[in-house]
Image (spheres, rainbow, N blue to C red):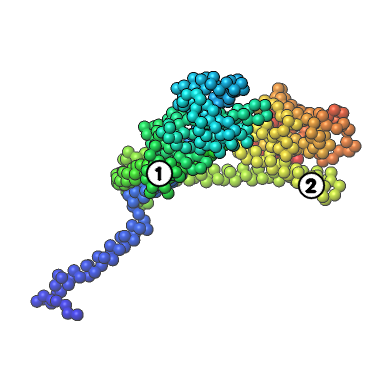
Amino acid sequence: MSVQTRSDGRPTDDVRRQPALAHAPRKGRLSLWRLWRRPTLLVHLISFALIVLVPALLFSAFLIVQFSQQQQEIAAAQVNDTAEIVSNAIDREIYGLMTSGRVLAASPTLAEDRLAQFHERTAAALLGTSTTAELVDGAMDVLVDTRGAFPPNSLPFDDRRLARQVFETRRPAVSGVRFRDDRGEFVYHVAIPVNQEENVKFVLVLSKATTSFEAVIADRNLPSQWTAIIKDAAGKRVFAAVTSDGRMRAHQSVSYDNPSIVETIGNASMEAELIKASTVSSLSGWTTTVAVPSAVIGRPVMRSWLLLIGAGALLLAFSIALGITFGRRLAQPILKLARQAEQIGRGEPATVISTDIAEIAQVSKVLAQASRERREAEEQNRFLMREMSHRAKNQYALIASIARRAANESSDTAQFLATLSEALNSLARSADLLSSGGWQSVSMSELAKSQLKAFGSNSDQIVIEGQPLFLNATAAQTIGLALHELATNAAKYGALSKPEGKVQIRWAVGDNFSLTWRESGGPPVTPPRHSGFGTLVTQKMTARGLGGSVDMDYATTGVVWTLTAPLDAIEPRPESGEDDAS
């Protein structure tokens, strides 16, 4: 490699610049690496804004998906309900026609064969209802026809299958849809038997145009593009309707034979995108189908997606701009704070930073107080260690005392372990309550509930009464252990051994503290033949530990235990010395 030199033998300026140019990409890579490993405050703020924003957008998208599914479910339920409502409305119309037929069939003119009078009265009754009546005999001849004068033309009835069905079953029947040339419209029949003793004498057939259903269905308030079609048992179109301006209107251009809901909509490509439901009438056997395009339901969802995308883009831009603005505003005083810390580290005097950010100003003040606060913290730690040692010694002494007395009162190792375990569990429950109050005090009510929880303190068998009262640590442990022993004895031999037994715990504060345990409803009480560990705890240890007195009355109706102690023995107080655990 040749090196260009000047006349004096030194390298040219281009040669001297080559090493610097060679190291420039490397320095750029190092800066990017440092930025990646230790981003600036500005990067942190922008990242934080994105971390907050992105989950919110994702959650919004999740809500939109859930909303879409709920809309589909709601639409499916609404379509199903609408099909049932339309079917029921049609059934009511048919049932009304059937009721009218029964009234006409009960006319005495038929029983007396006064057919001319029946024709006159029936025509007058059906006037203005768009309904015609025909009276058919067993030979399928029409005896009365309100469409014309009496007597009618001697033509057989055109729906013999319907008439024979009524003659055979003696029950009303509803026909399918058929076109009547004389009326020039599609009609349906309701056939009613006219009974004479045990036989059907005639069949009264009421005929009505299917267009009459338009008034029945028109009051259904539905959104646009909802469609309904009613087909008879043979698959013929009874009625078809499409929603327009919030009301269902007749759609007569649908095929008569084997019509479909898609044909009612008028768009065969939408068959796979329909939400539809069908119901079959038990009265007429007709099938009512209601449908709505899925796209109608999806429009609000699509608007929600577009709104989410637009709002998300605006929020993203706003978050980045906000991060840049606040990042610059925070970075400058933080850099000043760093320079202040460097001055303190060098032992140089450092003035308080002038800033309108309260937290940074507070940090500047805290640096001057750090040494004093650390000494205070160390002193506090030593005090807490002494206090913990003091509490531990008291607990060890109390446990040792209980262990010694339990050993003296136990006949074997198993009894000793059981007695000691129960006592330690009682102390543990009291200790849990005391620890929540900083080992200073515990509520008498909470202490009683905690010690009797295993015996059903929330049941009707145990009644706890007394004014609000707080006990010190020594009183809480002593009384808690006594209550536990009393409850254990009551569960084994006393009131808590029977469902009807009751235990009342009541305390009062006057010149002294008074606590009473009273049992009732249990087995008859007999005084114990010898004193055991329970007697030792409930009487001697309790009285001695609180400097009071204990009265134990073994009444036949139930044990009554009464503790009386001075107020200063139970009231919370700062403890500075050792507690008497024995």
* Mark before the other along the chain sequence, 1 or 2: 1
Q: Residue at x 22, y 67 (%)?
A: 20
| Callout 2: SS | helix
Residue plotted at (32% across, 49% down)? 42
Quadrant in the picture for the C terminus: top right
* Residue highlighted by disc 1: 263
Residue 279 screen position, x and y as percent = 52, 39
Q: Residue furthest front?
A: 154
Q: Is residue 326 left or right of residue 512?
A: left
Which amino acid type corresponds to the residue marked 2 in the rendered image?
Ala
Above or below for 404 versus 462: below
Q: Can residue 332 be seen in this view?
A: no
113 vs 311, left or right, is: right
**Residue located 59% across and 36% down the image:** 164
Kindly report which numbered mark, 1 or 2, lies closer to the viewer in this rendering.
Answer: 1
In the rendered image, is residue 546 in sight?
Answer: yes
Residue receiving disc 2: 418
- In this picture, is 400 found above or below 570? below
Picture residue at 75% right of the left edge, 31% below the top: 461
Front residue of 114/527: it is 114
| Label 1, label 2: how far apart the Cα atoms are | 85 Å
